[in-house]
Image (cartoon, rainbow, N blue to C red):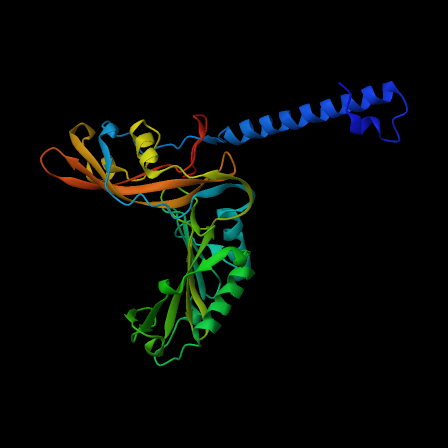
């Protein structure tokens, strides 16, 4: 079939040219159709991610019920590809170098400098670093700078340690004001900055306003304590990531996430057997009442993936109860068993 509009074009000088042009149109059309089909199936194919290693398996997980809100804060979130990871070793070396810290002869968990003005404690059980700068501890009757000055000092200090401060969110509702007693290491909380000799500011790495968890239990956060002299205490989980966003993913309805838990797609964040000596065979109900949307890091995949963290109670035969926390993917995933969530 010949197309009249094509036949009139000046560069078509023969029947062969017309056949060639028509053939190109057909190939282009086929290419567009195939591209649309490929894009459709690519979008429908869920991303591959690791299955969480659970703290323990609950024998009666099919008994799970949920009675909390099902309203989602967002409709979709991207999976985040980790492009750079700063971990425990990086921040430990930063602090050792800056303050000339040496390992204590008493324990490997303590570092001190020669004049003992700085000490660093490694809390290995919860992967925290705790730095104390003793010369900056607040003294009675000292006056704190304005909050904006404290925040600027805090960000400048964190930047000097290698933190990407533009990725850290500081919530002013988390500020705690304290006043020192006669001993400079003893404090009591006060209501306002005018009464305080020190302030504690909390920073957290969040993406899309969703908190980041680097282990199954602990969200990434940094607590800085400042006096009139500057930073005197730093407590933090020594991890930070830089990321790039991948494809946006629709968040699963909460009801679907609960059903996925019933089918075994979950990890426990509470070690019931260790904490409360719970006999799993005596669990008569698992009642979840609230959830939080979080990003969780899988070191093996180098991905930050949206998860729902559910919390509630387990009921035991005899009427006892115990708190429980469970997590499950907030998006559709193809899960593998070879790797696990970082601990």
Q: How many marks?
A: 0
Percent position of residue 325, x then y? 29, 41
Residue drawn at point x = 31 percent, y = 31 percent: 259
Compared with 230, 43 (above or below) is: above
Q: Give the farthest residue toward the bottom.
A: 141
Q: Left or right of 342: which side holds 315?
A: left
Residue at the (30%, 69%) spot, across then down: 186
Q: In this view, does 174 lie above or below 241?
A: below
Quarter of the image for the N terminus: give it. top right
Q: Position of residue 248 (x, y in %)?
A: 51, 40
* Location of residue 51 (image quadrant): top left
Report the residue at 55% width, 57% height from top.
97
Name, please, the residue furthest toward the front: 4
- Across and down, in percent, residue 243 comes to 55, 46
- Residue 291 relative to residue 65: left or right: right
Do we see residue 125 in this rendering? Answer: no
Q: Nearer the viewer, residue 41 or 106?
A: 41
Q: Is residue 164 left or right of residue 181?
A: right
Viewport quadrant of the C terminus: top left
Please say whether residue 150 is visible from this viewpoint.
yes
Picture coordinates of residue 321, whole percent (x, y)? 16, 40
View extreme (right): residue:
13
Q: Quadrant of residue 144?
A: bottom left
């Amino acid at each position: 079939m010949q197309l009249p509009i094509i036949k009139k074009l000046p560069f078509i000088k023969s029947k062969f040219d017309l056949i060639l042009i028509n053939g190109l149109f057909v190939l282009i059309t086929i290419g567009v159709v195939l591209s649309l089909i490929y894009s459709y199936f690519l979008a429908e194919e869920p991303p591959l991610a690791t299955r969480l290693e659970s703290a323990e398996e609950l024998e009666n997980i099919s008994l799970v019920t949920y009675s909390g809100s099902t309203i989602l804060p967002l409709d979709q979130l991207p999976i985040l590809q980790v492009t750079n990871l700063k971990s425990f070793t990086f921040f430990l070396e930063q602090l050792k170098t800056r303050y000339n810290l040496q390992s204590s002869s008493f324990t490997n968990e303590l570092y001190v400098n020669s004049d003992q003005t700085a000490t660093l404690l490694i809390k290995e059980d919860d992967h925290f670093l705790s730095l104390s700068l003793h010369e900056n501890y607040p003294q009675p009757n000292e006056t704190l700078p304005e909050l904006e000055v404290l925040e600027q000092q805090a960000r400048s200090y964190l930047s000097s340690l290698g933190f990407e401060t533009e990725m850290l969110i500081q919530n002013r509702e988390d500020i705690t004001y304290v006043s020192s007693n006669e001993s400079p290491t003893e404090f009591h909380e006060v209501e306002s900055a005018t009464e305080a000799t020190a302030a504690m500011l909390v920073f957290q790495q969040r993406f899309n306003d969703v908190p980041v968890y680097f282990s199954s239990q602990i969200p990434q956060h940094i607590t800085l304590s400042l006096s009139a002299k500057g930073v005197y205490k730093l407590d933090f989980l020594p991890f930070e990531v830089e990321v790039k966003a991948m494809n946006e993913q629709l968040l699963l309805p909460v009801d679907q996430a609960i059903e996925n838990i019933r089918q075994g797609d979950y990890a426990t964040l509470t070690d019931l057997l260790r904490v409360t000596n719970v006999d799993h065979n005596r669990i008569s109900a698992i009642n979840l009442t609230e959830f939080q949307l979080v990003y969780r890091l899988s070191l093996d995949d180098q991905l930050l993936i949206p998860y729902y963290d559910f919390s509630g109670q387990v009921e035991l035969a005899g009427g006892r109860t115990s708190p429980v926390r469970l997590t499950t993917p907030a998006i559709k995933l193809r899960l593998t068993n070879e790797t696990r969530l970082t601990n």
